[in-house]
Amino acid sequence: MVTKLPFNLSQDAASGVVLVGAALLAMLFANTPLSVLYTDFLEIPVVIKFGGFEIAKPLLLWINDGLMAVFFFMIGLEIKRELMEGHLSSPSQVILPGIAAVAGIVFPALVYAYFNQHDPIAIKGWAIPSATDIAFALGVFALFGKSLPTTLKLFLLSVAIFDDIGAIIIIAIFYSQDLSTLSLTIALCGLVILFILNQMNMRRQAMYILVGVVVWAAVLKSGVHATLAGFALAWFIPLKLQNEDGHAMLPHLEHKLHPWVAFFILPIFAFANAGVSLAGAELDLLFNSVTLGIALGLFLGKQVGIFSACWLAVKMRIAPLPKGTNFTQLYGVTLLCGIGFTMSLFIGTLAFANQDLAYQLNVKVGVLAGSIMSAILGAAVLYFSSRQSATNQHLSRNA
């Protein structure tokens, strides 16, 4: 049984447009005299101090470590709901998107590694083109795939969910450093408290959030990336237990958070991280190994990996195509999976956090180039597939 998706076409399209607008605004600020204001805004110092405990970071890192933790919290809520009672609770619905997601992580990483295998610093960015921006991808689908079967959108959402799980595992294993035993112990104690609250059927959402903030602060200080605290917290939110207002807690939180994430958190992140100053940039920037590895990893690695893996799985009868779809429509969706954007930019900030700013410039250009190419070609394939689907439906009704 397929549950109702927490997304709708109009909201997906609108959030995609806002996300693109935020990125374009960042580019405008970064390449005009407003660049000074842009840089100063991102470097505003923000300090929170409680006794001997202090968190002092520029605004950019509060966005990347704080607001993105809320994004990962919502992703965790979505994954938990889909796995426990949604369309991913059925094994038959899991096989094809699971295969696609694995191929969509491995192939782009191999493409990136091909260009950067001899550079010990650059190779750290191997995971950057493996990510998919679900908000952007669903937005393009909503705009250009209106007449396509809902099962195709479910497939895209499922691949993105598994992709998010892969990204979280990658961040936890490969982009955590200088671990603090004390901070990790505090975070673990917080998770134990959350487990106890869950077992006690605690109905007050504020209790979970309060403990979750403590866990986030401890993880932030631990050396493990703070966004993982948001994901971990989500798994301790009861699925069906009603909160103090009589709403099922997890779906209620997910429903309330989705507009904030789609229309505020992700656009703010895009604005803060997509500003690429092209002043003095040369053509060599486009042919840098990091830039090429990311751009081609997203554009070629994603589509080749996902489509070939799905084609083989269907032909070998391991899994069927999504109901009512064909390979052309599936190809359009595999192209959308090459839209890395916010997630790829996020992983890029982690991969080269301690390196020269030139690496971040290469990351931004590569992500934008690969994502734009994937979005344009994906939109074109879906648009013509959608028109063909609409024509076929019209002919069948008049037959």
Image (tube, grey):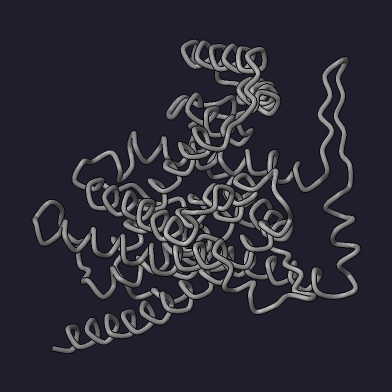
Q: Quadrant of the N terminus?
A: top left
**On the rendered structure, is 278 left or right of 184?**
right
Give above or below for 383 relative to 182. below
Residue positioned 55% across, 27% down in the render: 233
* Whether residue 134 can be seen here: no
Relative depth, front residue between 227 and 135: 227
The location of residue 288, given as percent across then percent down, is 58, 68
Residue positioned 13% across, 88% down in the render: 399
The location of residue 105, given as percent across then percent down, is 39, 51
Relative depth, front residue between 109 and 230: 109
**On the rendered structure, is 383 left or right of 348?**
left
* Whether residue 258 can be seen here: yes
Give above or below for 187 relative to 19. above
**Residue 214 placement: quadrant:** top right
**Residue 221 placement: quadrant:** top right
The location of residue 163, given as percent across then percent down, is 41, 48
Residue positioned 16% across, 56% down in the render: 313
Residue positioned 71% across, 55% down in the render: 268
The location of residue 296, given as percent across then percent down, is 46, 68
**On the rendered structure, is 67 left or right of 17?**
right
**Total count of labels:** 0
